[in-house]
């Protein structure tokens, strides 16, 4: 079945360590996104990519990095520079809106990162 | 500033009752509005999507309405079930369906 796969689902990190969250999609979508979700807040955009080998900063990119070497993959690295990395991270993808595509946003199941 | 507001912040109802969640937005230009359901610890799942020309859309017991003039939307849940307990997120998108703006969500709890 088509969809978005995030891994790991749970991750614990010591302060000062970098960690990488995986996101893979087989929906043939051009655009991919990373969001951060904190309790009581709306999703906040970290990075997005609309095409392979290109990505743009979102609203809260500081302390994070991404790559888009393949259409299917958009990994997120949480670096030691991120001051408060404990959160729920969601990856999403969408196709281009057109006559046959609503441009709907599909989400993965999320990755919960906890800094010890 | 593009914003999406939702009310109430949280809601508790008894199983079998109906409820209505509200979404107000200031996103411009407007492309479409979506409602998502997010179970605790899971990714959001799409319930409905409406474009400018649509003013109502149903998905089973979920019915969404849109008033593009007043920039308001509602999500009505009929005959609630325990499995409806979740957060409901309103998302508005701008140019070409991109530029997604998220509301903070309404946390719904359905009690037996």
Image (cartoon, coloured by chain):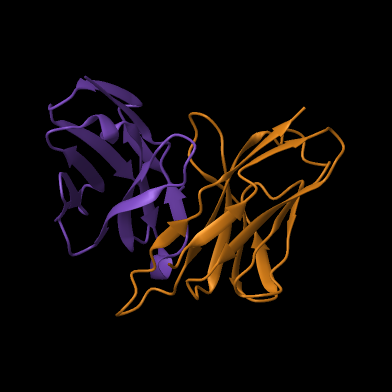
Where does residue B3 sit, x and y in percent of width and height?
Answer: 42, 44
In this rendering, does residue B2 appear at all? no
Residue A86 placement, left or right of A43? right
Residue A39 placement, left or right of B84? right
Q: Residue at x 39, y 58 (%)?
A: B93
In this rendering, does residue B70 appear at all? yes
Residue situated furthest bottom in the rendering: A99
Residue B74 placement, left or right of A110? left
Where does residue A95 sit, x and y in percent of width and height?
Answer: 44, 72
Vertical arrangement, residue A55 with respect to residue A43, above or below: below
Q: Classify the position of the C terminus of chain B by image quarter.
A: top left
Where does residue A29 sit, x and y in percent of width and height?
Answer: 50, 73
Displayed quadrant of residue A103: bottom left
Q: Which chain is purple?
A: B
Vertical arrangement, residue A26 with respect to residue A86, above or below: below
Q: Residue at x 40, y 70 (%)?
A: B96
Per the rendering, the colour in which chain A appears is orange
Number of callouts: 0
Displayed quadrant of residue A80: top right
């Amino acid at each position: 079945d088509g969809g978005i796969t995030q891994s790991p689902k749970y991750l614990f990190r010591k302060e000062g360590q970098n960690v990488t969250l995986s996101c893979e999609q087989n929906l043939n979508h051009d655009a991919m996104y990373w969001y951060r979700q904190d309790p009581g807040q709306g999703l906040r955009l970290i990075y997005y990519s609309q095409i392979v080998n290109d990505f743009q900063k979102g609203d809260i990119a500081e302390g994070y990095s991404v790559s888009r070497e393949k259409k299917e993959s958009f990994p997120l690295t949480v670096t030691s520079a991120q001051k408060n990395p404990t959160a729920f991270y969601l990856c999403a993808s969408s196709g281009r809106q057109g006559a046959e595509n609503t441009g709907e946003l599909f989400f993965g199941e999320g990755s919960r990162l906890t800094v010890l | 500033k593009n914003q999406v507001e939702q009310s109430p912040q949280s809601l508790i109802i008894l199983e079998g009752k109906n409820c209505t969640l509200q979404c107000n937005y200031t996103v411009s230009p407007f492309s479409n509005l979506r409602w998502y359901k997010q179970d605790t610890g899971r990714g959001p799942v799409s319930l409905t999507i409406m474009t400018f020309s649509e003013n109502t859309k149903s998905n089973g017991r979920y019915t969404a309405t849109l008033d593009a003039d007043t920039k308001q939307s509602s999500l009505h849940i009929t005959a609630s079930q325990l499995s409806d307990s979740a957060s409901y997120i309103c998302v508005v998108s701008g140019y070409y369906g991109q530029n997604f703006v998220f509301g903070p969500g309404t946390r719904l709890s359905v009690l037996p």
